[in-house]
Image (tube, rainbow, N blue to C red):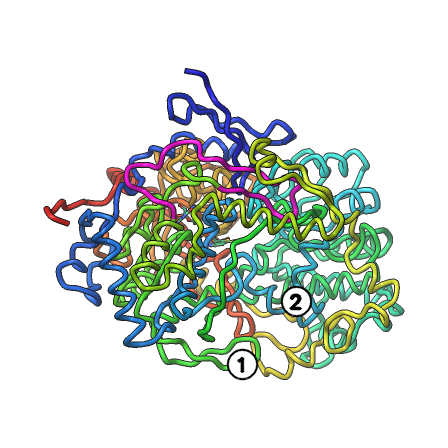
Amino acid sequence: MPRELRSHNSHWGAFNAEVMDGALVAVRPYPLDPDPSPILGNIRDSVRHRTRVAQPMVRAGWLDRGPGASGRRGAEPFVPVSWATGTALLSAELRRVIDTDGPEAVYGGSYGWASAGRFHHAQSQLHRFLNCLGGYTRSVNTYSLGASAVILPHVLGTHEELTYRATTWPALVSNTQLIVCFGGIPLKNTAVDSGGVSRHHVRAHLRDAADRGVEFVLFSPVRDDLPEFLSVRWHALVPGTDVPVMLALAHVLITEGLHDRAFLARYCVGFERLERYVLGVDDGQPKNPEWAESLSEIPAQTLRALARRMAACRTLVTVSWSLQRADHGEQAPWMGVALAAMLGQIGLPGGGFGFGYGSVQRVGAPLYFGPPALPQGRNRVNRFIPVARLSDMLLHPGEPFDYDGRTLTYPHVRLVYWCGGNPFHHHQDLGRLRAGLARPETIVVHDPFWTSMARHADIVLPSTMTLERNDFGGSAHDPCLVAMPQAVQPYAQSRNDYDIFADLASALGVGEPFTEGRDEMAWLRHLYEDWRGAIAEQGVSLPTFEEFWRAGYLEMPRTGGEFVLFDAFRADPERAPLRTPSGRIEIFSATVDGFGYDDCPGHPVWREPAEWLGSARATRFPLLLIANNPRTRLHSQLDMGEYSQSAKVRGREPIRVHPADAAARGVADGDVVRVYNDRGSCLAGVVVSPDVRRGVVQLSTGAWYDPLDPADERSMCVHGNPNVLTFDKGTSRLAQGCAGQHALVEIERWDRALPPIKVLDPPPIERRDGL
Ligand code: PGD
């Protein structure tokens, strides 16, 4: 049989699927990709992996006792049912909930990245379906950018432009002399972008920067947050103390007269308020380098010298997205902007402020025409939660909460519907999440795999994997729209989310509004041709759908040249003001100040995080855990894949430990440790490494949650999911964002027999006749 190549896209790279005899035999990176991601190595074995969901499943207790029988979610067997039974049960349950409590009783926030195909985009499909039924309670913002999405519009009048119009890499590399990176530019994250990546370009840009002699200064507890080929001065600060370091740099600039007064007067408001704070006029505490040293452990002299150097050359201050995924996460990007403003280089090529270089591939990329998207319809329910307040919503219905100057109320949710996301991956304090998930009357999940969220559902509907359907993938930050023709047959009885929703919609009397009479290929053709027509109106001619589908890859023209962030504002702040109340950079925001939040006042401040190495709690749990995004997979996706598995230590997620901390605990490379605090515990496999600072351990997210005792909400995870340890608290009353990066923990060697990993096998299945 000849081998066939099918073009395809994933969030971590475009590729050709090599198919023989109907089976996927290899995954070949897109030939034009200069730096393909090894994460592609997870795909091949996952397609027919035993953790695929084979047919619709219903939790035994829900089937026997009906909705509301929640006591043993996550600890009961599942009963396989036919599609007809599954559709009938679920459509009746949706009707019951909506008729009894209205559509707002359905939580359809369904956060998650799902897959790169834009038509089969799982969240859009779910939202379109629920909108046909009257709407749903939604979520706002993301786990990626919970705090910055709320604070930065108050400060800069925009959040999006920091990503979409960030100074492009060539403009940056050829002008910058010094990049001061708070949180680094980790290459592992740039492997990934939502919608797909056809060319991984960040490594090449960084190499270019190295060749040009750009200086890099890294403030991070983890050395490889910048690649080793750069000339880097690594300052391994105490995690969570970036803001004191920035304040101290500001202190030096002010006291030595190095700040750009003219820029601050013309382009900013409220600098005087920050200045009083930095100088300690009101609280008696100057935020000088000695003060910052006492918190961050970075020598005062180092900070003084750095501030002088920053003022003397073209300097970019970058803040990674991870810094705002922490308690008081609003402060680091806000103070980063203020520091850059004091240097007076905002709006100049290679100077000013950068946010999220190294957090995904798109920051610093040019813009292309964004791909076609499925219309989601209109949500007639006006209830929402900030996305990371999921457990609060489930545990505290009817109670008030603060958000961006408003007091809102948590809705009474009866039915939770998840499609294309995994809260057991992305949410904090999983013991608390499990308590929350015990509350709703019904939980529905679509997923190709038996993820933990699927295991905690009542009705599980098996979705196809992306290679089992037709689609296209791409993003506005990538030059290629990729045709994704079906490569292999659907696994067992799995079906496309679209077809599942079409049947449910038809059973609920909204079949026509949902499908508009189209099947999968008719939708693809329709969305593409509509999109092509809109682009033609801008004078750009693209191939027909048939031509695109045959070619597999559509190389797109750019919609613009190089960007310099805020250059128009700098050129003429009267004609191109920012969309803030003052039209200028709000170093002091009267709006935020007016909200009266003690944990997010009117200008950037240092507030102690709930957990850091300086907390009293550190006497009990003396190590600071960094729970960052993983290197060997995207989030929790395809954790069973070959590449992700290759990094495990005795089957457990690797945890990096500093040699001194390892020695103090009698722990060596290759040992398994129990990582614990008073919220939970997990096992992890030790990698002793000097690349994390002393007092810090690093355990990435994404190992599938695998409780030793599934009936115990706070059971130890035997696999290494760090979210059993993280705390579930909003970043502040302003943004209520995810603060999952940090938690205090302790580790101890695990000398007992290693419990088996169960999550890489299906849960117990109880076959019954006639269903
Ligand atoms: P994924 O693992 O990508 O995680 O959280 P997110 O929920 O996005 O989950 C996607 C799920 O979709 C997988 O289960 C996959 O199998 C499924 N899926 C894929 N394709 C399809 C499909 O076509 N249909 C259906 N129905 N399902 C599909 C990510 C989130 O985690 C993010 S973005 C960030 S930045 C956060 N980061 C951190 C962090 O830094 N630290 C901590 N502690 N926690 C975090 N959580 C957040």
Sequence-earlier tag: 2 or 1: 2
Residue 184 seen in this snapshot: no
What element does badge 2 sit on? helix
Residue hosting label 1:
406
Could you tell me how far apart the alpha carbons at marks 2 and 1 are, in whole angstroms?
Answer: 17 Å
The amino acid pointed to by label 1 is Arg
The quarter holding residue 186 reads top right
Q: Is residue 640 above or below residue 707?
A: above
Residue 66 seen in this snapshot: yes
Residue 57 is left or right of residue 637, and the answer is: left
Residue hosting label 2:
152
Bounds of the magenta span?
471-496
Q: Residue 94: where, in percent of width, then height?
A: 29, 65
Q: Residues within 10 Å of mark 2 (few under 14, many from 20)?
A: many
Q: Residue 655: where, in percent of width, then height?
A: 44, 42
Assess mark 1: CB under 8 A from ligand 1?
no
Q: Quadrant of the N terminus?
A: top left
For the point 19% across and 45% down, which residue is it?
Answer: 764
